[in-house]
Amino acid sequence: MIKKVSILLTLLLITSFKCNAQNWDINTLNKINEWEIHGASKVISNTTPIITIGLPSAMGIYALIEKDKPLLKKAIYIGTSVIEAVGISYVTKEIVDRERPFLKYPDKITPYGASGIKSSSFPSSHTAAAFSLATSLSITYPKWYVIAPSAIWATSVGIARMNQGVHYPSDVITGAVIGVGCGFLNIYANRWLNKVLFDE
């Protein structure tokens, strides 16, 4: 009897927590979606692929032209961190298949400049890419003038995606965790990659 009651209470707690978490998610998003920064959000959101692809690519091209092996290693580390974060995000999207908030709650959430998006919401691949770039860049160049702008930009991307109504806060938080995690874990992956590419 005690075991059955314990199981019932546990299930009720889990259900209650899930409901509260969902309420927090949509209520927080609703507030952020109402902020009058939609033009800036669109611009910031659109910078994500440009910066996350462009920066490591530019570093790599310059390193090849100048035959700068240390810089090339850094470019590969930063670029592969972004690739890993985006890859993990897209695989997770396919598995979870969470509906976009503006589609699920059309009465509460307005899509700004992103109404045509039909892919899964969870997690935010823009945020994952931004945080993986910011983390790997900050690890590569651990100076305040690199870390601070990188962190501010990555955070702005997450906020922009919510302000546009295309992601829940939990999507953005998970994307950030994936991005930061890939930035750190890729340190070890790149040790193996350096052996393959540079025989070191």
Image (cartoon, rainbow, N blue to C red):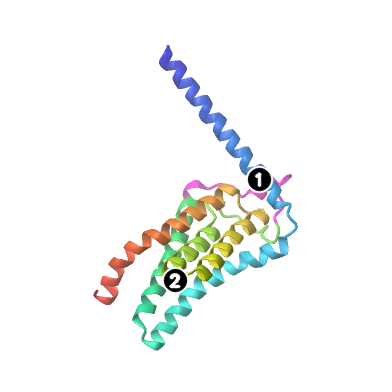
Q: Foreground residue, 184 or 7? A: 184
Please state the horizontal and vertical placement of residue 136, each as a whole percent of the image: 44, 65
Q: What amino acid type is highlighted by mark number 2? A: Tyr
Task: Read off the residue under disc 2.
Answer: 141
Stretch of the chain drawn in magenta: 95-111
Would you say residue 65 is visible in this rendering? yes
Q: Foreground residue, 103 or 6? A: 6
For residue 28, the mark is 1
- Looking at the image, residue 38 sits to the left or right of residue 100; the answer is right
Q: Nearer the viewer, mark 1 or mark 2?
A: 2
Residue at 51% x, 66% y is 147
Among the two numbered marks 1 and 2 on one chain, the one whose residue lies closer to the N terminus: 1
Which residue is outermost to the left? Answer: 199
For residue 184, the mark is none
Name the image quarter holding residue 182. bottom left
Please state the horizontal and vertical placement of residue 130, each as a whole percent of the image: 52, 63
- Magenta segment includes 106: yes
Question: What's the CA distance linking mark 1 and mark 2?
Answer: 34 Å
User: Given contact means CB atoms under 8 Å apart, are the residues at marks 1 and 2 in contact?
Assistant: no
User: Is the residue 15 above or below the residue 160 in the image?
Assistant: above
Q: Foreground residue, 85 or 157? A: 157
Q: What amino acid type is highlighted by mark number 1? A: Thr
Residue at 58% x, 63% y is 152
- Looking at the image, residue 169 sits to the left or right of residue 134; the answer is right
Would you say residue 117 is visible in this rendering? no
Crowd around label 2: few <14 · some 14–19 · many ≥20 (10 Å): few
Please state the horizontal and vertical placement of residue 174, each as a whole percent of the image: 51, 50
Q: What secondary structure is found at the residue carrying circle 1?
A: helix
